[in-house]
Each structure stands twice: as structure tokens, then as C-alpha cells.
Image (cartoon, helix red, strand yellow):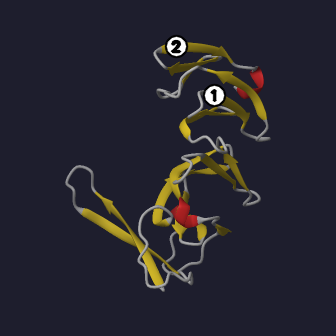
Amino acid sequence: MNRKIKIAAFNLRTGALKGERTYGWTDNAVTDGIYHGGGSYGSAFLNGNDLYIHQGQRLALYDFNNYVPGAEPVKKWAQERYDQRSPLGLVHQDRVYFTDYNSHGLIAMKLNTGQYIHFDGGENATVQAAIFGKGVYVGQSDGLLHAYDLISSKPVFTVRTGSREFAPLLKTGGMLLVQSGGKLHGIKLPASLN
């Protein structure tokens, strides 16, 4: 099935259309006649000069500054379980990020290898997740907050908050602020996560 995405440029002052670019691909996935849209189907985001387009079973990278109609991507990666996750439109520490529809867990794909890393609570759903510096922080429905090293994906520490509720996580200086169950926890972070 042939698919495409159009990217339009507008004059910010007048709102006039300045031009359009069309990026196309063929999606050979067997979908049994079911239309898929959004999520990992046709969404795109720009990171500097790198245009990432989720093309069904693959993620494609284009050089945005050197647009050539009909050109092949500069690089492409196979997308794992593309119908079960939502792209976050984020590149950080040479990784692209997604959330899992079922567990709400955070998934990172290494751009150099295409390897996927899952940061989730296993049997316990992720309630809140954040990435700061070299750390990934996952608060889950059993009240535990796990910190992982983003580069190695190894666990660094776990905090028992005593509540299943988590507000958005914040970081200031070398401290992680966790609001959970009406309490505010301040956690001094190891230097390796900054």
C-alpha cells in the first residue's frame, strides 16, 4: 500500500503557504483491510536537521535540509510492535522514545543499533515516567519508583513511596522531586545520572 505524508511551510506573519514537501513509502504490512492511522503510522517529527517518519513497520530518517522528491531515507530501522506503542517525538542521548499502549511503559530505541529497551514495571503499570540527563525514572502502580541508567539500562535505585499516585516528576540541580500520595519526596541523585 502506498502511503505519504505532506509537510507544509507557512509564512508566520501572513499565514500564506510557502511550499510543501511530500515523503512517500510503500507499507507491505498485512493489515487484513484494517486502516491504521496515528501512532506509529505516518507520524513525523523534526530534531534539528533530522526528520523522523514512522512508516508502519519502520522508522525512517531523512535529511530535512537536503530535500529531494522521491528520495530514499538516509537511514531506516525496523519498528518493534508498531501497533502497540505511541511515538513521543523525542530524541535524547541518541535514542528515540515511545510509550507502550498496554503497560504505559517507556520504550527507547538506540539509534546506532536499532535495539529496543523497555523501562516498565513488568506486572505493575507505569503511572509516571520521566527522562532527565542520563536517568530514566519510572513510578509504577505498586508505589515503587525505579531509577535506571539511560545508557546501560541498568537499575540504579528504587524508592518505596507508599502510594500508587504520582504527579509529574521534577528535577532541580541534583535532586529528583517526587510527589506521591500527598507527600513530597526529595531524592539526591547519584552523579552518574546527571
Which one is earlier in the sequence, the residue at label 1 or at label 2? Answer: 1
- On the image, numbered disc 1 is attached to which residue? 144
User: Given the image, on which type of amino acid does mark 2 rest?
Assistant: Leu
| Residue 109 in the image, given as x and y percentages of width and height | 67, 54
* Horizontal and vertical percent position of residue 130: 57, 35
Q: What residue occupies the far left of the structure in this picture?
A: 14
Image quadrant of residue 84?
Answer: bottom right
Q: Amino acid at mark 1?
A: Leu
Element assignment for label 1 = strand
Disc 1 packing (10 Å; few <14; some 14–19; many ≥20): many
Count of numbered tags: 2
Numbered tag placed on residue 132 in the rendering: none
* Residue tagged 2: 184
Of residue 182 and residue 168, the one placed in the foreground of this image is 182
- The residue closer to the viewer here, 124 or 78, is 124
Residue depicted at x 26% and y 64%:
17
Query: Residue at horizontal 60%, vertical 20%?
Result: 161
Residue 188 falls in image quadrant: top right
Check disc 2 and report its element: helix, strand or loop: strand
Left or right, residue 119 beside residue 45: right
Q: Position of residue 181 (x, y in %)?
A: 48, 19
Please provide percent x and percent y for residue 57. 59, 72
Using the rendered view, name the quadrant where residue 33 is placed: bottom left
Q: Quadrant of the C terminus?
A: top right
